Image: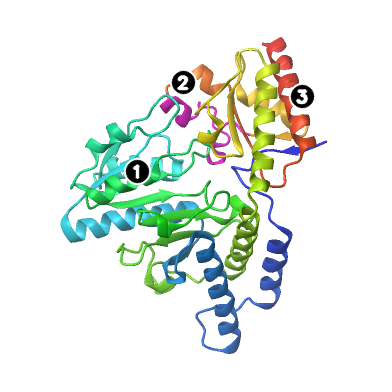
Amino acid sequence: MNAYLDNNATTQPLPEVVSAVCECLEHCWANPSSVHRAGQAARARVEKARRDVADLIGAGPREVVFCSGGTESCQLAIRGTLEQAEHDNVRRVLVTSSVEHSAVRDLAKKLQACGQAEVRWLPLDASGVVDVERAAGMIDDKVAVVSLQWANNETGAIQPVQEIAALAKGAGATMHVDGTQWVGRMETDVRKSEFDLLTFSAHKFHGPKGVGVLWVRRGVKLCKQTPGSQELGRRGGTENVPGIVGLGEAAKGAAAWLADPGQRARVAAMRDRLEAGVLELVEGACVNGPRDPRRRLWNTTNLALPGVDAEIILLTLAEMGVCVSAGSACSSGSLEPSPVLCAMGLDKKQAAGSLRISLSRFTTEAEVDHAIGAVSQAWRMVNAVV
């Protein structure tokens, strides 16, 4: 049998998402900025999706900006805030962490190398979680923007975004939260938060690829990065109507799923069983990230398997019909150990022998059983070879 357990890379789109995207491609393909009836029909579908997305995160519809994905959303949030802050009061400091997704981590390095921003890297504990007490001294009145992910894409570690947001607010800085792995999987209510910007992507919660969201709290200013007047002047470019409508359907599906806490508990129990099964069968295996499963996203485990290279294990598992990864999907094809795991203090050998396994609401008990057996069998096979 097959077991797809790489849901932090992307998720299977909901049937209603597929239907909505196909219907728009066939019947609602006009430009939503056009004033004729076909254009206004497309505009109505876009604005309905905007309301559905806003409802998912507790926002106002006019605070929702549609982008091409999570990467562009993060770029707009960080670059847009830095440019606005420099224009207003010459703040040029970006504070972030070395365990961010490459969309943020690599951008920070580029901005620093080009002299466009000073970057301060937040201190981490051994589990890859930001140390709030030590971070407090790094966020001062020179900081323009603080950017921190809500849940790590490789380990599932949940970051103290609310506490860091309070520090940013106290320093007069803008707080950006990368919610790509969080939104659609955990309850989100921006009205109860102190952060200013939130980014996420449709395909992480059973929506289509090629569409993402930047939530901008009312009153927060940022410079747009693409010319044009679309998206309330915040982001130029003709809207991707089918993708946006699919995102709206995914948002409605996520809201309904989150309304039943038992559903999340069901999948979390499968994650825990899979993790325990591998740890029992693979001698010397250990969890990368917080040991307490409650401090990790309910669907994610990252396991270090001793004495092997994850790339070889991945190929062996693929032949057994098991889809997992060795880290971020955006670094696929790279033979280098995960920068996230290395930043957590793992040596290169341990980081290079680690697997990320991520479940979804569609994961079955049979898939978990198959994966437990396959991972332990693949580990024994590869160890016998090496």
- How busy is the neighbourhood of tag 2: few (under 14 within 10 Å), some, or many (20 plus)? some
Q: Nearer the viewer, residue 253 or 105?
A: 253
Q: Nearer the viewer, mark 1 or mark 3?
A: 1
- How busy is the neighbourhood of tag 1: few (under 14 within 10 Å), some, or many (20 plus)? some
Secondary structure beneath label 1: helix
Secondary structure beneath label 2: loop
Residue 253, image x, y percentages: 65, 59
Asked if residue 362 lies left or right of residue 261, the reply is: right
Figure check: 79 above or below 105: below
Q: Earlier in the sequence, mark 2 or mark 1?
A: 1
- How busy is the neighbourhood of tag 3: few (under 14 within 10 Å), some, or many (20 plus)? some
Three-letter code for the amino acid on which mark 3 is drawn? Gly
Q: Earlier in the sequence, mark 1 or mark 3?
A: 1
- Magenta-drawn segment: 325-344
Three-letter code for the amino acid on which mark 2 is drawn? Leu
Q: Quadrant of residue 215?
A: bottom left
Figure check: 334 above or below 277: below
Q: Are marks 3 and 2 in contact (CB under 8 Å)?
A: no
Using the image, tell me which numbered label, if any, was put on residue 346: 2
Q: Nearer the viewer, residue 268 or 381?
A: 268
Asked if residue 172 lies left or right of residue 6, the reply is: left
Three-letter code for the amino acid on which mark 1 is drawn? Glu
Q: Earlier in the sequence, mark 3 or mark 2?
A: 2
Residue 372, image x, y percentages: 73, 26
Q: Quadrant of residue 369?
A: top right
Residue position marked by numbered label 1 in the rendering? 163
Residue position marked by numbered label 3 in the rendering? 373
